[in-house]
């Protein structure tokens, strides 16, 4: 079964296709700004041509369900619902925080690192309005990321303490990653203190580093097993996960 993955939860727009039966993944990612609605469908068409796959052959669609940009999440869910309803494909949402965690893990292993060194991450994504979306995650033996606490949104100075380490053989410290560290690194490091350790290539623990953002290719890797096992949902179940219910600050709050 050919699979498709999409993400428009940040300023970036990305898509990926996994071909059947060779499992090869082709992907694209561009800095879209506010042009996701203009770029996403042409990007899908380009990938389909490169992969030699027709849209009608897509049997499962994974997508970044959030948290993230309100507009971006609505765009991706609308496109996923439309494609899935038209072609009878299953859908499966993946947390944008898990997408970032998977990128860090993949980079670490590709650089020759040990899996044991990359099993506990705290992902923080820039939520704008002076806040971050964040949660601690752990890599499980079942080859999947698990959220150890619910995803929360708060000012970086008010993030909750990290849980006690659970990974076998770990020293009780967490690897920090995500665009939240690029935007609010010093504040997050002050809050989490010694619980954070910098040891993974590609992670972000400083304000001047390039942020890790959710991407379709990592979403697809995480969703493949579930989609191939028939664990996807019907088209109308492609819904966003917002976390907070305000889009912007009021005029008085911007002062």
Image (cartoon, rainbow, N blue to C red):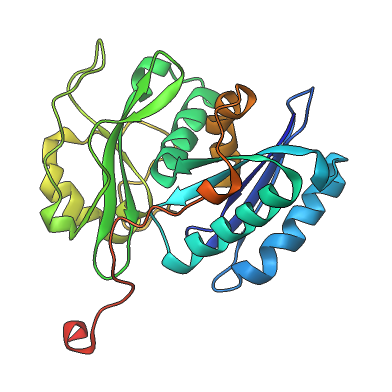
Q: Quadrant of the N terminus?
A: top right
145 and 205: which one is in front? 145
Image spot of residue 167 (x, y percent): 26, 17
Q: Residue at horizontal 54%, vertical 71%? A: 33
Position of residue 8 relative to residue 178, above or below, is below
Q: Is residue 35 above or below residue 189?
A: below
Residue 116: in sight, yes or no? yes
* In the displayed structure image, the side of residue 203 where residue 17 appears, left or right: right
> Residue 148, located in which quarter of the rendered image?
top left
Please state if 102 lies on the left or on the right of 248 as rendered.
Answer: right
Q: Position of residue 69 (x, y in %)?
A: 43, 64
Front residue of 89 and 134:
89
Looking at the image, the residue that sits furthest to the top is 169
Q: Nearer the viewer, residue 202 or 60?
A: 60
Q: Quadrant of the C terminus?
A: bottom left
Residue 41 placement, left or right of 208: right
Q: Residue at x 78, y 27 (%)?
A: 20
**Residue 100 lies in quadrant:** top left
Q: Position of residue 117 (x, y in %)?
A: 35, 20
Q: Position of residue 83 (x, y in %)?
A: 70, 52
């Amino acid at each position: 079964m050919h699979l498709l993955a999409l993400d428009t939860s940040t300023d970036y727009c990305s898509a990926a296709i996994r071909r059947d039966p060779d499992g090869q993944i082709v992907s694209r990612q561009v800095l879209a700004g506010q042009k996701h609605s203009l770029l996403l469908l042409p990007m899908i068409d380009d990938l389909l041509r490169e992969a030699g796959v027709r849209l009608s052959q897509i049997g499962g669609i994974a997508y970044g369900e959030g948290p993230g940009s309100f507009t971006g999440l609505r765009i991706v869910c609308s496109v996923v619902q439309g494609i899935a309803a038209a072609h009878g494909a299953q859908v499966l949402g993946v947390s944008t925080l898990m997408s970032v965690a998977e990128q860090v893990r993949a980079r670490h292993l590709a650089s020759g690192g040990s899996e044991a060194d990359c099993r506990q991450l705290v992902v923080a994504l820039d939520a704008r309005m002076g806040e971050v979306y964040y949660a601690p995650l752990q890599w499980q033996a079942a080859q999947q990321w698990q959220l150890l606490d619910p995803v929360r949104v708060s000012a970086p100075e008010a993030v909750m303490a990290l849980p006690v380490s659970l990974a076998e053989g770990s020293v009780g410290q967490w690897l920090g990653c995500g665009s939240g560290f690029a935007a609010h690194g010093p504040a997050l490091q002050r809050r989490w203190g010694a619980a954070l350790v910098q040891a993974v290539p590609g992670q972000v623990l400083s304000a001047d580093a390039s942020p890790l953002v959710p991407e379709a290719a990592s979403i697809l890797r995480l969703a493949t097993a579930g989609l191939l096992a028939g664990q996807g949902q019907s088209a109308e179940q492609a819904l966003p996960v917002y976390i907070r219910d305000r889009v912007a600050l009021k005029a008085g709050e911007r002062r």
